[in-house]
Image: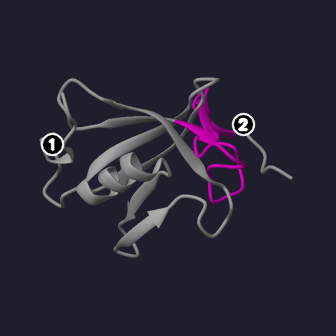
Amino acid sequence: MAFDPASLTFDANGLIPAVAQDHATGEVLMMAWMNAEAVARTVETGRVTYWSRSRQAFWVKGETSGHVQRLIELRIDCDRDCLLLLIEQEGPACHTNRRSCFYTALREGEERIILDPMV
């Protein structure tokens, strides 16, 4: 069956959450938003493209930083309202220069930084 991004369930702003996960390690790297065109561009090019809500523009991950995300596989959840992007990540995924955006853990009621920026 051919894939059509229009078959996905987008929110009122035309967006769908996309979780990027390292295809080899299973590490969750980041979450960002996509619209139908960003999904289509990602599938067509193999370069992960998000929709920047702050800039109201397409954001090809790594286009300026060099921290490219290559799509290995796109998975759709059961409600078709969330995407899992299995990717190959070059360098850090987070704008803070960390491997993952999920670098703060709640442990025993306290927030703890668990990942340092990459050098």
How was the colour assigned to the protein in this rendering?
A: one colour
- Residue of label 2: 114
> Mark on residue 9?
1
The secondary structure type at the circle numbered 2 is loop
Q: Does residue 102 belong to the magenta stretch? A: yes
Tell whether 114 sits left or right of 20. right
Q: Quadrant of residue 58?
A: bottom left
What distance separates the C-alpha of mark 2 from that of mark 1?
34 Å
Closer to us: 91 or 99: 91
Q: Quadrant of residue 24?
A: top right
What residue is drawn where x is 32% and y is 50%? 39
Circle 1: residue type: Thr
Dot 1 crowding, Cα within 10 Å, few <14, some 14–19, many 20+: some
Residue 26 % position (x, y): 58, 24
Of label 2 and label 1, which has the lower sequence position?
Answer: 1
Instruction: Judge whether 117 appears above or below 24 on screen.
Output: below
Closer to us: 32 or 57: 57
Circle 2: residue type: Ile
Q: Does residue 107 belong to the magenta stretch? A: yes
Q: Tell me which segment is drawn in magenta.
A: 87-114
Instruction: Judge whether 57 appears above or below 114 on screen.
Output: below
Tell whether 47 sits left or right of 111. left
